[in-house]
Image (cartoon, rainbow, N blue to C red):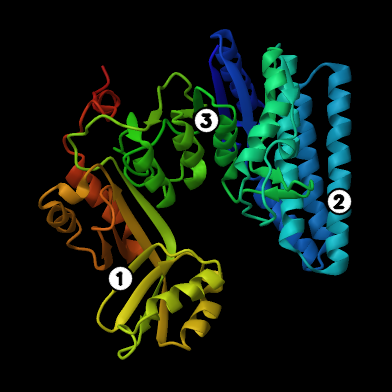
Amino acid sequence: MSLVVMKFGGTSVEDPAAINRTASIVAGRVAAGKKPVVVVSALAKVTDQLLRAAACAAAGDRTGSLAISSRLRSRHRDTAAALVKDPQAGAELGNHIDEQFNALDEILRGLAAILELTPRISDLVVSYGERLSSRIVAAAMLERGIAAAHVDARDVVITDAQFQKAVPLDSVIEKRAEQHLKPLLDEGKVPIMGGFIASTEEGITTTLGRGGSDFTGALIGGALSADAIEIWTDVNGIMTCDPRVCPDALRVKVISFEEAAELAYFGAKVLHPATILPAVKKNIPVLVLNSRNPDNEGTRIISLAPHCKSPFKSIAVKKKLSIIDVVASRMLMTHGYLREIFTIFDKHQCPVDMVSTSEVSVSLTVDSTDKLPAIAADLSQLADVKYEGRKALVCMVGEDIRGQQGIAAQVFNAVRHINVRMISQGASEINMSFMIEEDDADEAVRSLHAAFFKDPDPEVFDVEAQKLATQPAS
């Protein structure tokens, strides 16, 4: 029997109807002879509301904070009641939900008293989303005849103590998966666990960062050497661009690990950037699938994708970026100068997306706008500094871009009506990217898509779906 890790995002568990669809998908995998491990996100929008409750409490608004918690309690109790009709199971689940919210309310009251929200307490507060959703989903699946068994993800996913973006300890996770998950799978049970949440070896709650449920699925897949990792979301897979921007976007049927990782980092919302790493290590295929359209084959991410006749596979956009210009006419060529610049970014734990240098200046792009004033203050000790916000990074991903003659000319001809601020091509064989004003991003994507996806390769793109969509109604 093949082992498959199935991760379901917030929209796949947002309400009773969505959870019923998820249960049907899991039941289908079991009926097909597979051994699933299910990882679920919090109910849609719950993480944002928990963060808001914590922020209100820390600002002294105890009443507002507890009101948010009360609304969330009602939502979870209503969802559970709609899914679990067995009186005893329903009562047990309802009591568990109340116990969890009573504990959360105590934390919020404490925050309102001390008026300080630390990263450690923030992780504890937001962990309630996945802790509750996984219990509800497990109970719903049990009622539908699936041999579900709830597992607290914090017993399996072990990390360091970098709260809000903890680093997983792979070797410990493998041991914990062997200890907590393998026996359940051997008994024919379906483990159900929350994504995103984890703990230190001492048992202190941590999280993997926003969007980290994908990462959880991949970590569990890697730890168990799964045959496949399935990421269930609300779109048909990785698309050639955001279909909300370009309605004729195509589904990418197959893509390489390297290309998918690049797209995820540079703004494609379908995958968390770290998702690919555990899969690459064990060469486990990742499938991006649609829980609202489970018959669609989605996108398959594998180590070596077939050759594509089209120069690009997809266009991603990363918005809300800033450009920092560091100008020092006499210092640029001085030994160690660039190292000093990057030491400052390291000090502030601020990653850099793109770098461009000239004789007298260094330009860098970052997405950590809240840290900009402090970074600029430190950089000003070395040189003149200025920064601008509201920029967007357009990233075009495909195979062997560097080796395709004239490709840059084609790209910039397609966006000749848009002002380009920074360009990066030679650093990667599969990525060509440039910086523009945020307000121009959608127009740039539409122009690029029209130029490069006129004749899509049917081996790589779902051309048939496009044909069906454009056929006149009979």
Q: Which residue is mark 1?
A: 356
Quarter location, residue 19: top right
Q: Which residue is mark 2?
A: 105
- Name the amino acid, label 1: Ser
Give the image location of residue 171, x and y in percent: 62, 39
Q: Secondary structure at mark 2?
A: helix
Q: Quadrant of the N terminus?
A: top right
Which residue occupies the extreme left position in the image? 405
Q: Which mark is residue 232?
A: 3
- Name the amino acid, label 3: Trp
Give the image location of residue 448, x and y in percent: 23, 50
Give the image location of residue 445, x and y in percent: 29, 51
User: Gap between marks 3 and 1, in whole Å?
Assistant: 38 Å
> Total marks drawn?
3
Q: Is residue 6 above or below residue 389?
A: above
User: Gap between marks 1 and 2, in whole Å?
Assistant: 49 Å
